[in-house]
Image: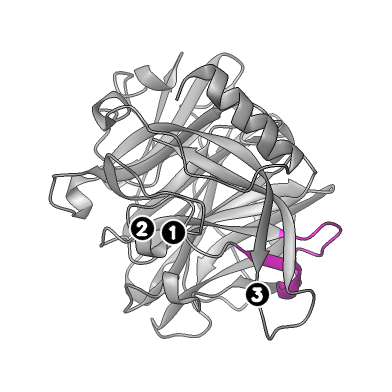
């Protein structure tokens, strides 16, 4: 799509005069595929630098580069090792808050997976020993992310309701510091829609990533369907204007995947990917990792996600980090039924581009 056509569609989408339409054609994935063969990217911008964090060699490694395209060539610095043999290390998430870098990550085996946090004044060295987060109810927990909304820190994560692996829900809790929550945990999403139950055992909502739209409304974009299948995709939870993040019925869920590779599960008006299968567990590349710096309407902004190139057997081992972009898409209505509150909510959603 040429720039004039994109600009025209953007104006129509923002003004609400145009129903959400198909996503633009993308360049071949070889232009967007990084050399990082890994899952669960987390990337933030610090001034003119890009800082990424990943699980590597049984620990956590950081890269720094002047652009997203050069991250793969940047040296990795191991900032944490699993000296206490906690187990599998998954999905580290980096943010910059109050002059310190915080990396929240999952470690454990089986039902013992829990959230941990380390911090440092420097992006790629000097991190503290890990602190286990005492999340409410102390259940299996992965993919945690910290954010601030209306002056209150929150933690959002994927977890089990009980002690068995039936489904992964999304929960939020208030925070009193970057390493501690307070009060209860509140479920905000369960994988109960048909399009997010295509692949199960368990059914999942995971990889929550918060962002704030141009109207100031909070969103949590998340991954649905099993990461072990090409049905993996991104979907949206949008908090209604003035809503309470801790009240489940103030959240409205997109009516299908917004970034995925299978047409049958896509929300109406959103097209499947052209060059990758199973895009998911993304990272909005925000300044300081702060949703207060979420981009305005009208332009594309950088995104990192993992996926498998079409034509390649889908497996965890074949996942790479990909660079992409996203664009706010106005006048997007999410619908629901037979629950408390209004049946529809209209506002911004996102278009994703490979």
Quick one: 167 or 17, which is closer to the camera? Answer: 17
Which label number is shown at residue 263?
2
CA–CA distance in space, label 2 to label 1: 5 Å
| Of the image marks 3 and 1, the number of the one nearer the N terminus | 1
Residue 21: x and y in percent read 53, 45
Rendering coords of residue 182 (x, y %)? 74, 66
Label 3 vs label 2: CA separation? 21 Å
Q: Residue at (65%, 69%) from the top-left corner?
A: 335
Between 177 and 171, the one nearer to me in the picture = 171
Q: Is residue 319 above or below residue 257?
A: above
x, y percent for residue 73: 29, 18
Does the magenta-highlighted stretch encompass residue 17? no
Q: Is residue 163 left or right of residue 44?
A: left
Measured as percent of width and height from the top left, residue 23 is found at: 46, 40
- The circle on residue 331 is none
Please, what secondary structure does the residue beneath circle 1 have?
A: loop
Identity of the residue drawn at 79% across and 77% down: 341
Which disc is residue 266 wearing? 1
Residue sitting nearer the eye, 53 or 247: 247
Residue shown at the point (33%, 37%) measured from the top left: 321
SS under mark 3:
loop
Residue 258 visible in the shown view: yes
Judge whether residue 251 is colored magenta. yes
Q: Which residue bears the numbered disc 3?
A: 336
Query: Which label's residue is closer to the chain start, 3 or 2?
Result: 2
| Between 252 and 178, the one nearer to me in the picture | 252
Asked whether the beta carbons under mark 3 and mark 1 sit within 8 Å of each other, the answer is no
Write the start and end of the magenta stretch as one range.
Answer: 239-253
Question: Where 78 sits versus 347, above or below?
Answer: above
């Amino acid at each position: 799509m040429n720039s004039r056509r994109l600009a025209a569609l953007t104006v129509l989408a923002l003004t609400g005069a145009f129903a959400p339409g198909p996503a633009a054609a993308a360049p071949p994935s070889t232009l967007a595929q990084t050399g990082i063969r890994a899952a669960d990217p987390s990337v933030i911008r610090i001034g003119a630098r890009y800082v990424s964090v990943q699980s590597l060699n049984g620990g956590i490694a950081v890269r720094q580069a002047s652009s997203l395209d050069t991250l793969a060539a940047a040296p990795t610095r191991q900032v944490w090792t699993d000296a206490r043999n906690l187990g599998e290390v998954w999905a580290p998430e980096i943010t910059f808050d109050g002059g310190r870098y915080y990396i929240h990550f999952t470690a454990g085996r089986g039902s013992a997976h829990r959230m941990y946090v380390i911090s440092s004044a420097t992006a790629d060295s000097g991190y503290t020993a890990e602190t286990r987060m005492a999340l409410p109810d102390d259940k299996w927990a992965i993919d945690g992310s910290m954010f601030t909304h209306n002056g209150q820190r929150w933690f959002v994560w994927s977890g089990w309701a009980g002690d068995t692996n039936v489904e992964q829900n999304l929960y939020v809790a208030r925070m009193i510091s970057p390493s501690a929550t307070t009060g209860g945990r509140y479920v905000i999403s369960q994988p109960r829609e048909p399009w997010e139950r295509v692949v199960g055992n368990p059914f999942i909502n995971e990889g929550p990533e918060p962002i704030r739209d141009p109207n100031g409304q909070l969103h949590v974009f998340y991954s649905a369907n099993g990461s072990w299948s090409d049905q993996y995709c991104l979907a949206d939870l949008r908090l209604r204007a003035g809503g309470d993040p801790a009240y489940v019925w103030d959240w409205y869920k997109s009516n299908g995947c917004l970034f995925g590779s299978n047409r049958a599960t896509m929300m109406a008006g959103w097209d499947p990917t052209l060059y990758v299968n199973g895009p998911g567990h993304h990272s909005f590349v925000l300044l300081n990792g702060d949703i207060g710096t979420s981009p305005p309407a009208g332009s594309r902004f950088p995104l990192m996600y993992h996926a498998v190139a079409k034509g390649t057997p889908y497996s965890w081992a074949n996942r790479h980090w990909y660079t992409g972009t996203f664009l706010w898409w106005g006048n997007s209505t999410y619908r629901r039924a037979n629950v408390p509150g209004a049946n529809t909510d209209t506002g911004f959603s996102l278009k994703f581009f490979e």
